[in-house]
Image (spheres, rainbow, N blue to C red):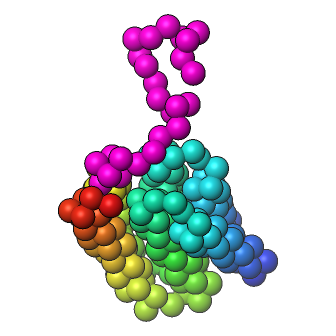
Amino acid sequence: MTLLLTCCVGGVALAALLCAAKAVIADTVADRIVALDMLLGVVTCGIAVGAVATRDPVLLNLLVVTALLGFVGTVTVARFMERRGL
Amino acid sequence: MSQILDVVIGVLLVAGVFLNVVAAIGLHRLPDVFCRMHAATKPATLGLLCVVGAAALAIGEASAAAKLLLVAALQFATNPVGGHMVGRAAWRAGSPTPPATRVDGQGAPETAS
């Protein structure tokens, strides 16, 4: 179980790294929004993996927060982009 | 019984993390922003659902399961809406699309480039 959790954390870290790299090298604003939205989803996954590892119910509150934050952030930046015509 | 539960938790964890890694690779491999949105919304949502299910089984309390159900419901409700908003904004901003992603449903298949 410990080895499996280590592999899962490694996979989440790899996914987060790829998303962050995409957000840096993206050529349009929409690409950055998509990559950062995905990055927050990967972070949510990482917190859930941490909750499995520690069996700590406190981490679940963080999950609700990141799930909501991702939606609000994505919609806000998309609206902003639409209004500014970026 | 607890060993079976551990196996189920492990399978769900591996499936969820695998889907997330695939989605992150798709962000780099797919040609334009509309294709990348496909990678960023669908596999990522399913992957998160798997990991959240694993967490619910691992913690095994009713209050924790209710909270995780809320997270899953939020993801299912908000990810399509967010994807739609980003897609509309990208379309109106005139995001470049490579010719290979354009499908002409009425055209002859040989001349489609």
Observer able to see residue A16: yes
Residue visible at 58% across and 83% down?
A50
Please indicate, yes or no, whether residue B13 appears anywhere in the rendered image.
no
Is residue B108 located in the magenta-colored stretch of the structure?
yes
Per the picture, the main secondary structure of the magenta-coloured stretch is: loop
Q: Nearer the viewer, residue A85 or B2?
A: A85
Q: Is residue A20 above or below residue B111?
A: below
* Tally of marks: 0
Residue at 27%, 59% in the rendered image: A85
Residue A52 part of the magenta-drawn span: no
Q: From the viewer's perspective, is A9 left or right of B90?
A: right
What range is drawn magenta here?
B89-113
Horizontal placement of B112 versus B85: left or right? Answer: right
- Who's the residue at 59% across and 89% down the image? A54
Looking at the picture, does residue B69 appear above or below residue A54? Answer: above
Give the residue at x 64% y 50%. B29
**Left-right relation of B53 to B26:** left
Q: Where residue B109 appears, x then y in whole percent?
A: 54, 11
Where does the C terminus of chain A fall, quadrant-wise? bottom left
Name the residue at the right extreme. A3
In percent of width and height, residue A27 lies at: 52, 60
- Quadrant for the N terminus of chain A in the image: bottom right
Give coordinates of residue B96: x percent, y percent. Answer: 45, 45
Of residues B104 and A61, the one drawn nearer to the viewer in this rendering: B104
The one of A26 and B27 positioned closer to us in this rendering: A26
Residue furthest left as drawn: A83
In-image side of A77 versus A24 (left or right): left
| Displayed quadrant of residue A52 | bottom right
